[in-house]
Image: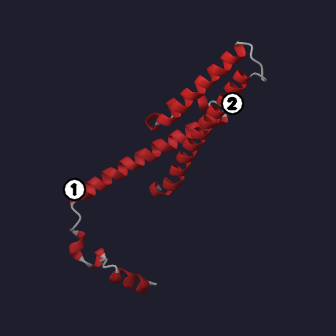
Amino acid sequence: MESNLDNLRASLDITEMESDPTALHSISVETLRALENRRIFAEGDYEEDFDTLSNLLVLQSSNLLHEALATATGRNLDPELAIKASDLSRARDEFTHAQSMGYGPSNDVYKAAANALTVASNAYEARIDGIMTGLKTTSDTTSGCWS
């Protein structure tokens, strides 16, 4: 197995840093500091995403996710979610207006408002599912990096 690794290293022109003392000096102190700084920020981002996901899962299990999602995500506020929430609110208003006008389920205005409400609600729910899936995926794929 080691010979395969040596062959690959030779064919790809990759030097082994331990065997080449000059290679160890090719990484400057500033580069190492910059890399460490980026690692620290990345770990902080991961911890923030993990905390956000944990909080959202608690809210989801309490049926409070919709009400709190926009503020719970902090820096990860999704602009598309705000648009979907606005569309849903407008569709609810139109449906409520149709009901208040006395239109029944057989009326075309009522049917259109009900359909618009269903479409807006489905789009909003799909966006929430996408946000939750994205946070779970990010958390799952980076969880081993910081252990």
Question: Left or right: 94 with respect to 30?
Answer: right
Is 113 or 108 nearer to us in this picture?
A: 108
Residue 1: % across, % down: 46, 84
User: At numbered mark 2, what does the secondary structure look like: helix, strand or loop?
Assistant: helix
Q: Are marks 2 and 1 in contact (CB under 8 Å)?
A: no
Q: How many marks?
A: 2
| Residue 84 location (% of width, % of height) | 55, 32
Identify residue type, mark 1: Glu
Mark earlier in primary sequence (2, 1): 1
Q: Which mark is residue 101?
A: none
Q: Is residue 139 visible?
A: yes
Q: Is residue 117 above or below residue 20?
A: above
Whole-Å distance between the Cαs marked 2 and 1?
A: 60 Å
- The local secondary structure at tag 1 comes to helix
Q: Residues within 10 Å of mark 2 (few under 14, many from 20)?
A: some
105 on left or right of 98: right
Quick check: 5 above or below 40?
A: below
| Residue beneath disc 1 | 30
Residue kind at label 2, given as amino acid type: Asn
At x 46% / y 38%, what residue is drawn?
76
Q: Residue furthest bottom?
A: 3
Q: List the residue tagged with mark 2.
A: 115
Decide: is 5 above or below 106. below
Q: Quadrant of residue 92?
A: top right
